[in-house]
């Protein structure tokens, strides 16, 4: 657990950036950066979720919520019941908020004013929770001790590990649709069609850029895996992947997150935000010269007409240049195939690298 905490804390300086959707890409993107000056608990933002004008930012100083598009934030901490002030991920549905923290999975049903915290005593694989999303009474938590699933709103969890076929117990992110679950682990991309009872694990032998998978996203039947060795894309259920790297224009081969809509792909890299409009064959990379808070981009999320980008230097916002932007499907967290389940996907963060060191793990 110590190594996990070290890796996540090393992740530290993370913040977010918000830009416009594909319609504006033809004219380029320009960002304005927002920080603690606007009320963020910390510029180290580990994750983000947005719905309408509300933005939920998981920071290393608490959970910051804005109801006015990011102009100002209200911060929630352990004094409100959070398991820890180091919040790694957040997802929200209505007035219910799910926060993945270093001290457990915290759930609020009153907009963040108070939280109930769930830990290993409730069946979680570890109190160090890296990612979370929920649909109805089902909650999925990626932990340092496996993939934990609750079907009763968090009252109890069943934990799945390498004994169930996971590539590693170090789970970075999850994505689900129906009984199919996709787990990004430090030992490969693990897929279950049995609700977690058993997994098939996919690695570099299947074409992944690295077995170290940091994030996973689905758009229809296409699988996007953000790895430490590039962006890997599969159109046949994971049996084989095509890997894209800096040779295709990515800002860096170390990826932290990925989001896609049709042929447009957004890749969070340690060298900028890379966007492709041709399915990954070529990317345009955006950096601080375009207004991003940092070239170290650790997360990306699109909702409505906006794109949210997590960097190590603040929350950046770019105005949509097209008055009639093209819609971006609500994420699954799940989007794509999962959108059929009514998900409005949150940003996957997942694990970030230190601002002053090369990415870990």
Image (cartoon, rainbow, N blue to C red):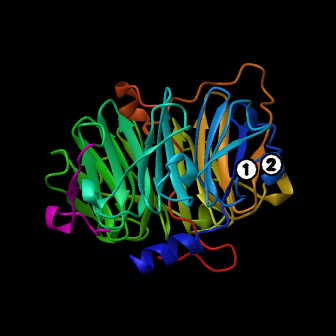
Is 286 situated left or right of 220 in this image? right
Q: Is residue 190 magenta?
A: no
Work out which quarter of the rendered image holds the N terminus and state it: bottom left
Q: How many numbered marks appear? A: 2
Q: Is residue 162 magenta?
A: yes
The front one of 182 and 197 is 197
Relative height, residue 172 to residue 93 (above, below): below
Is 260 situated left or right of 199 in this image? right
Mark 2, secondary structure of its residue: strand
Work out which residue is located at the far front of the displayed protein and give it. Answer: 79
| CA separation in Å, label 1 and label 2 | 8 Å
> In the image, which disc is placed on residue 34?
2
Relative height, residue 47 to residue 98 (above, below): below
Q: What x and y, as percent, mark residue 260?
A: 52, 42
Crowd class of label 2 (few under 14; some 14 to 19; many from 20; radius 10 Å): many
Please tell me whether mark 1 or mark 2 is closer to you in this view. 1
Relative height, residue 125 to residue 67 (above, below): below
Q: Residue at x 55, y 63 (%)?
A: 255
Place residue 304 in its image quadrant. top right
What residue is disc 1 on? 40
Q: Residue at x 30, y 53 (%)?
A: 238
Q: What x and y, as percent, mark residue 91?
A: 49, 41
- Segment tinted magenta in the rendering: 155-169
Q: Which sits earlier in the primary sequence, circle 1 or circle 2?
A: 2
Is residue 96 among the parts visible in the rendering? yes
Is there CB contact under 8 Å for labels 1 and 2? Answer: yes
Mark 1, secondary structure of its residue: loop
> In the image, which disc is placed on residue 148?
none
Crowd class of label 1 (few under 14; some 14 to 19; many from 20; radius 10 Å): many
Q: What x and y, as percent, mark residue 18?
A: 71, 43
């Amino acid at each position: 657990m110590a190594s996990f905490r070290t890796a996540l804390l090393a992740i530290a300086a993370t913040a977010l950036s918000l830009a416009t959707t594909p319609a504006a890409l033809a004219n380029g993107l320009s960002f304005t950066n927002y920080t603690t000056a606007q009320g963020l608990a910390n510029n180290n933002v580990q994750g983000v979720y947005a719905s309408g004008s509300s933005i939920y930012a998981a920071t290393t100083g608490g959970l910051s919520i804005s109801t006015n598009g990011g102009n100002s934030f209200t911060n929630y901490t352990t004094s409100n019941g959070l398991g820890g002030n180091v919040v790694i991920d957040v997802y929200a549905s209505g007035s219910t908020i799910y926060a993945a923290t270093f001290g457990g999975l915290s759930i609020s049903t009153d907009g963040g004013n108070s939280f109930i915290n769930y830990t290993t005593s409730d069946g979680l694989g570890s109190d160090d929770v890296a990612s979370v999303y929920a649909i109805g009474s089902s909650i999925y938590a990626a932990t340092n001790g496996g993939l934990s699933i609750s079907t009763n709103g968090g009252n109890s969890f069943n934990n799945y590990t390498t004994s169930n076929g996971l590539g590693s117990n170090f789970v970075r992110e999850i994505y689900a649709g129906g009984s199919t679950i996709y787990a990004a682990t430090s030992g490969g991309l693990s897929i279950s069609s049995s609700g977690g009872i058993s997994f098939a694990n996919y690695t570099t032998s299947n074409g992944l850029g690295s077995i170290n998978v940091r994030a996973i996203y689905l758009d229809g039947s296409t699988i996007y895996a953000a790895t430490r060795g590039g962006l890997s894309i599969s159109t046949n259920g994971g049996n084989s992947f095509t890997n894209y790297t800096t040779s295709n224009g990515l800002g860096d081969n170390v990826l932290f997150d990925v989001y896609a809509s049709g042929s447009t792909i957004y890749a969070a890299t340690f060298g900028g935000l890379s966007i492709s409009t041709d399915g990954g064959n070529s990317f345009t990379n955006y950096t601080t010269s375009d207004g991003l808070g940092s070239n170290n981009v650790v997360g990306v999320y699109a909702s409505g007409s906006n794109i949210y980008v997590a960097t190590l230097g603040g929350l950046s916002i770019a105005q949509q240049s097209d008055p009639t932007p093209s819609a971006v499907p609500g994420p699954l967290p799940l989007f794509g195939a999962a959108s059929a389940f009514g998900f409005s996907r949150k940003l996957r963060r997942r694990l970030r690298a230190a601002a002053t060191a090369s990415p870990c793990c």
